[in-house]
Image: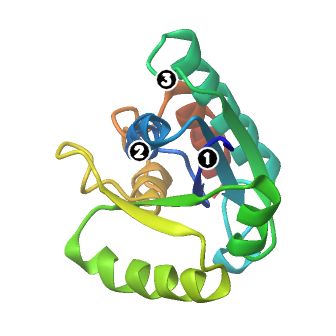
Amino acid sequence: MSRRIVIYPGTFDPLTFGHIDIIERAARLGEELVVAVAENAGKGPLLDVEERTSLTRAETQRLLDEGRVTVPIRVKPFSSLLTDFAREERASIIVRGLRAVSDFEIEFQMASINKRLHGELETVFLMAAEHQHFVASRFVKEVGRFGGDISSFVPKAVAEILTAKLGKY
């Protein structure tokens, strides 16, 4: 029998505590978790894919070191269709986080398309933790752009990089 591999895709621009919460919970759904960092140039990310991948690797390693996650986690960038990437990684479950009802419509559409493209792939929605449901990467960047304190939204290493980058604006 093959291992149940779960994939959690996202842009992670920047990685927030909400993403980390979903990573922890998604890891409980399988024997291995792949955190898939989307290149997503169309969104015009502030951080490049290498920075986002590196920051995500560091935070997932911290989760493993602290024993908060006990299954292997691989963090990999991708720039293809998610369904193709999932096939390459032998994933059977996609995890998507939902912050609000408004997220559901687009996520439902994407899940339906993914199912049509890869019939064996299931999508599981996890609700954001109550204390994280309002945190969106775009708001974190906006707060940081105006010099606001983002330390309650993102890990320290992420806050340092964002502060340095946003200080250039």
Please tell me whether mark 1 sits on a helix, a strand or a loop: loop
- Tell me the number on the disc at residue 22: 2
- Residue 45's quadrant in the figure? bottom right
- Mark 2 or 1: in front is 2
Say which residue appears at 52% left-offset and 21% top-offset: 63
**Reading the chain from its start, which is encountered first: label 2 or label 1?**
2
Point 49% across, 56% down: residue: 141
| Display coloring | rainbow
Q: Of the residues under marks 3 and 1, which one precedes in the sequence?
A: 3
**What is the C-alpha distance between the residues marked 2 and 1?**
29 Å
Amino acid marked by disc 2: Ile
Q: Which mark is residue 44?
A: none
For label 1, the residue is 167
Given residues 2 and 167, the one toward you in this image is: 2
Q: Amino acid at mark 3?
A: Val
Is 99 situated left or right of 44 in this image?
Answer: left
Q: Residues within 10 Å of mark 3 (few under 14, many from 20)?
A: many
Nearest-to-viewer mark from 3 and 1: 3
Q: Which x, y percent locates residue 116?
A: 59, 89
Q: Earlier in the sequence, mark 2 or mark 3?
A: 2
CB contact under 8 Å: marks 2 and 3: no
Q: Position of residue 35 (x, y in %)?
A: 63, 47
Pointer 3: what residue?
A: 69
Mark 2: give few (<14), some (14-19) or many (20+) Cα within 10 Å. Answer: many
Name the spot of residue 4 as percent of width and height, x first. 59, 45
Which residue does the image show at 44% across and 88% down from the upper left? Answer: 109
Secondary structure at badge 3 equals loop
Corner quadrant of residue 121 = bottom right
Which is more toward the observer, 134 or 126? 126
Q: Position of residue 148 (x, y in %)?
A: 37, 44
Q: Residue at position x 78%, y 72% from top?
A: 84
